[in-house]
Image (spheres, rainbow, N blue to C red):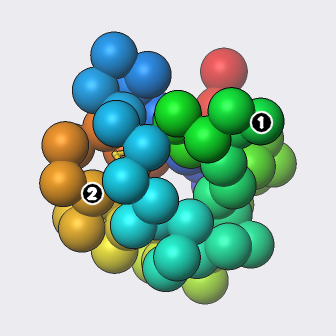
């Protein structure tokens, strides 16, 4: 099975923090809190479910789940 990771499009992210509130184990704020950062580790099945929910709830559509390169 191919590992998947979270990507955040920083041109779209506006730092609302919905993802950080929903999944603090996967997302955190950048030091200046202007955008979010995602864990770089490959996602477990449970993490992927949570990450996909966050992607759906992100108000700017900045979160995608992609195959690790
Ligand atoms: S919910 Fe979306 S816009 Fe808000 S901080 Fe997370 S990635 Fe950025």
Residue at the (27%, 57%) spot, across then down: 58
As drawn, 35 above or below 65? above
SS for callout 1: loop
Residue farthest to the front?
A: 32
- Label 1: few (<14), some or many (≥20) within 10 Å? few
Residue placed under numbered mark 2 in the picture: 58
Residue at the (61%, 41%) spot, across then down: 33
Residue 26: % across, % down: 68, 63
Using the rendered view, name the quadrant where residue 56 is placed.
Answer: bottom left
| Left-right relation of 8 to 38 | left
The earlier-in-sequence mark between 2 and 1 is 1
Residue 59: % across, % down: 18, 54
- Position of the C terminus, as image quadrant, is top right
Task: In the rendered structure, find residue 69 and report the number of the disc placed on it.
Answer: none
Residue placed under numbered mark 1 in the picture: 31
| Left-right relation of 36 to 49 | right
| Left-right relation of 56 to 68 | left
- The answer to whether the residues at label 2 and label 1 have Cβ atoms under 8 Å apart is no
- Label 2: few (<14), some or many (≥20) within 10 Å? some
The answer to whether the beta carbon of the residue marked 2 is less than 8 Å from any atom of ligand 1 is: yes
Front one among 34 and 18: 34
Front one among 14 and 58: 14
User: Which numbered mark, 2 or 1, is in the foreground of this view?
Assistant: 1
| Left-right relation of 30 to 57 | right
SS for callout 2: loop
- Position of the N terminus, as image quadrant, is bottom right
């Amino acid at each position: 099975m191919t590992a998947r990771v979270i990507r955040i499009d920083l041109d779209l992210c506006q730092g609302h923090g919905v993802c950080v509130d929903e999944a603090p184990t996967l997302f955190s704020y950048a030091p200046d809190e202007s955008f979010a950062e995602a864990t770089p580790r490959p996602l477990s099945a449970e993490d992927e479910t949570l990450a996909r929910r966050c992607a759906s709830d992100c108000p700017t559509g900045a979160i995608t789940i992609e195959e690790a390169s």
